[in-house]
Amino acid sequence: MGRLISLIEDDHPSLRAVMAALAPHTGRAWVIGLTGAPGVGKSTSTSALVGAFRSRGVRVGVLAVDPSSPFSGGALLGDRIRMSEHATDRDVYIRSMASRGHLGGLSWSTPEAIRVLDAAGCDVVIIETVGVGQSEVEVASLADTSVVLLAPGMGDGIQAAKAGVLEIGDVFVVNKADRDGADATVHDLRHMISLGDRTAPGLWRPPVLKTVAAEKVGVEAVMEALDQHLAFITANGDLRRRRERRARDEIEWIALAALRSRLGTLGGGGGGGGDAATLATRVADGSLDPSDDGLMEQAWQVRERVEVASRVYPSSETLDEFAKQQRYDAPGERKAAALALQGGRVLGYAAAYFPDRDNTGLCWSEVLVAPEHQRQGVGSVLVGWLEDRAREECRAVIVNEAVVPDGARVWHPGRAFAESRGYAVANVEIVRRVQLPVPEDVLDELGTSAQTAFGDRYEVSVHLNGVPLELQASLCVATNRLGLDAPTGDIDYEEESLTPVDYQDYLAHEADLGRTRLTALAVERDTGVVAAYTDIVVAAGDPDLAFQWGTLVLPEHRGHRLGAAVKVANLRALSQVSPRRKAIITSNAENNPWMVQINQDLGFEIIEELLELKKDLS
């Protein structure tokens, strides 16, 4: 088995034939993923589970994914060191595998290594992932049963919500339960699970258990929970679906590994490197001249082609809208843009945005490469230009986005490209869409429930193309807190500095673009404070779509269903102002269960995932 897994890790030329020969002998092993942050006792817990399975006479394989040596790419911790008590057991196979810099907690060769252990007769395969904290959710795509390990006193309850592991865990285990704070960690986890969508009838409700793995305390309860989960997913057909998904993911991972290899060669000699060097020169001379209508039109055409090629529901933007956006300087922000040119033809476009009054350590950026010119080094050159500009502006962090189809966050080429350039996924937002009009009975039910909750304390109103002057200052205060009070993952935002004068500037710009904005407010009657708001924007360029933008309920006003109230009010207004719109699109952080629940209640369905990508430039 060791030699076969080495063939996999080395990507040996004979690998395809070997895996084809093994395929008829696979599909029987129970794959258990065990993941958690550093220091929670993953290896000790894995060893305890191995012992419990061996007491049943079960043959066990363990894939322990370790950090990689920066020199050799091999596993630093080595085979069997952490589970030495099983080293002489012929029915236990333990293999350390290098993550080789992959940020998702798993080695690229893990899926094929699972097949090797399965074919070799292992009844159970345990995958223990490298302790990289918030990037470990990939284990769920390979496991029949996912175990999330936490420990008291490490902030794991909050980290679990931020990381998205509440969605992937089938069994939660609070290890080191003899420490202070164990009961509080269990309580927090159970509470957060109850806020999600995993408590509906017919769904598996993940148990939260306590263990002291070093002393084998609580291990039998974990084994019982694992057995119950396997029986549950076998009975409802989910086991078959998970294994079909695993087979698809293996194909995707192989393709992604090949793509990473190809990306790694860009700029390294040969025709590709020469092309990239030529493009670098052209980008240096290719800053987008706002007055050049010909280049502006070409850049807009790139935007439209990328939108059609990459989005599940692409939106249109007129050339006039695009050009006016490029020529607009937002208050308190500077913009720089560049083109990748070849023979006078625009291959790609990049823009950097530099806040001047707040968040002055950040650079927001975007990169668009025409579909027919992707994977040719164009994106690498444009990203390099963005990073150079950000460093010139003394920015410590650069942020970008990649929108991928639902379920594609692990393998999507956009993520692979970003990671090859040193970016990490810092936050995930879920993009949702609902068909319009939303049924009146749905709006009535949610609206009535919200009205009952907030009573006479607040007044809800909707405003067209801007709120009244007397409310603008309070709305700006709320808007400035969005980056602080809404979940933003590993990106640290400062409070923004929007003023009523800035707000009026934005409104004038939107009017110039031909946009219509609906703003629903919940205002506290006694104080006149804007306690909650939401915006819907109707763009001129797409006759079918509307977009639900920022929504916030100030923390001190939460618990009164104001989020539902303002969203319902705005949707009702939209049906009057623009009744021909067919759908509305929105996005929320996946770890914002309250707003997610409101959107689900309104009928929004997931269509895409928005990956917020971050790179430290300091």
Image (tube, rainbow, N blue to C red):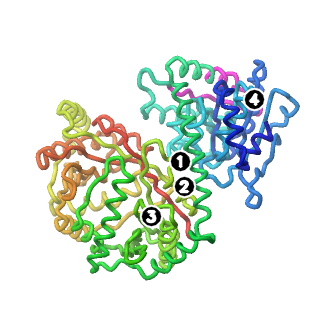
Q: Which mark is residue 517?
A: none
Q: Which mark is residue 120?
A: 4
- Name the kind of residue labelled 3 in the image: His
How far apart are labels 4 and 2 at the CA level? Answer: 32 Å
Say whether residue 449 is left or right of residue 78.
left
> Residue 607's x, y, as percent?
37, 43
> Residue 179's x, y, as percent?
68, 37
Q: Which mark is residue 416?
A: 2
Residue range of the region highlighted in magenta in the rendering? 205-225
How far apart are labels 2 and 1 at the CA level? Answer: 7 Å
- In this view, 427 is above or below 170: below
Residue drawn 61% across the image and 70% down it: 270
Q: Which residue is mark 3?
A: 373
- Earlier residue among tags 2 and 1: 1
- Earlier residue among tags 3 and 1: 3
Closer mark to the observer between disc 1 and disc 4: 4
The reply to whether dot 3 and dot 1 touch (C-beta < 8 Å) is no
- Name the kind of residue labelled 1 in the image: Trp
Residue drawn 33% across the image and 50% down it: 554
Packing grade of label 3 (10 A; few <14, some 14-19, many >=20) is few
Q: Which residue is mark 1?
A: 411
- Earlier residue among tags 3 and 2: 3
> Is residue 524 among the parts visible in the rendering?
no
